[in-house]
Amino acid sequence: MPQSSTRSRKFKAILAGGIVLGVGAAVTLAAWTDNEWAEGTFGAGSFNVQGSTTGAEDSFTDHESSEGAASLSFDLDGGDNLSPGDTVAAPFVLRLDGETSYDASVVLNNAAGSGDNPAALTYEIVTVADAAACSASATGDSIVPAGTALGSMAGAQDFALTAGADATAGAPVTLCFKVTADDTLAQGQDTTAQWQFTATSAE
């Protein structure tokens, strides 16, 4: 009988130890947690090209459609009408406005002539120092070579516009348009020319 009592005590001791071990395992599974969050805010820059027919500071504005195209003033010595062999000139000044964040590359994207005499007219575009320097004899960096048909962009070169700093407008670039009439110019007729420039922001 005493031997049986001993076995019973050993069995209970082992069982009790198992319970203790089980509780201990459950405690070690518990863990502390903490969180960290991060965010970013991404603002978009601004990009806008303005044009002026005079280059005066208060004359720059947007000309975003063919209907709102800037009207260039081609002056002809001795009158308003072209004759065969005449060349007339007019300036157009481009710049980036004060809100623009990036420099730009500009290219002539479209040229068109309409009316009665487009085939009798050719044009050239060069860069000059300012609007006052634009004349029939002006020279400068070639944007479109002399003798280009009125509706053509053949040989057109791109050019750069630089953004200003601290909300100031960028440095202007003055284009001098020169239009020449050849011997096929018909009398008493009107012709309209339009040019479209496209500016692309530079990274």
Image (cartoon, rainbow, N blue to C red):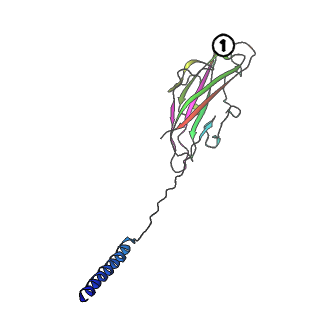
- Residue 123, position in %: x, y? 60, 20
Residue 55 is one of the magenta-drawn residues: no
As drawn, which residue projects farthest toward the front?
1
Quarter of the view holding residue 60: top right
Q: Residue at x 55, y 38 (%)?
A: 172
The region drawn magenta spans 152-179
Quarter of the view holding residue 111: top right
In the rendered structure, the answer to whether residue 37 lies left or right of residue 11 reads right
As drawn, which residue projects farthest toward the right?
188
- Residue 118, position in %: x, y? 67, 17
Q: Callout 1: few (<14), some (14-19), or many (20+) C-alpha neighbours within 10 Å? A: some
Instruction: Name the foreground residue: 109 vs 34.
Output: 34
Res 134 visible: no
Q: Residue at x 35, y 78 (%)?
A: 19
Kind of residue indicated by mark 1: Pro
- Residue 153, position in %: x, y? 57, 22
Q: Which residue is mark 1?
A: 84
- Residue 103, position in %: x, y? 50, 40
Instruction: Name the foreground residue: 85 vs 94.
Output: 94
Secondary structure of the magenta portion, mostly? loop
Q: Quadrant of the N terminus?
A: bottom left
Instruction: Name the foreground residue: 181 vs 195.
Output: 195
SS at badge 1? loop
Q: Is residue 55 above or below residue 146?
A: below
As drawn, which residue projects farthest toward the top?
183
Q: Residue at x 74, y 17 (%)?
A: 189
Q: Is residue 67 above or below residue 96?
A: above
Q: Residue at x 49, y 58 (%)?
A: 39
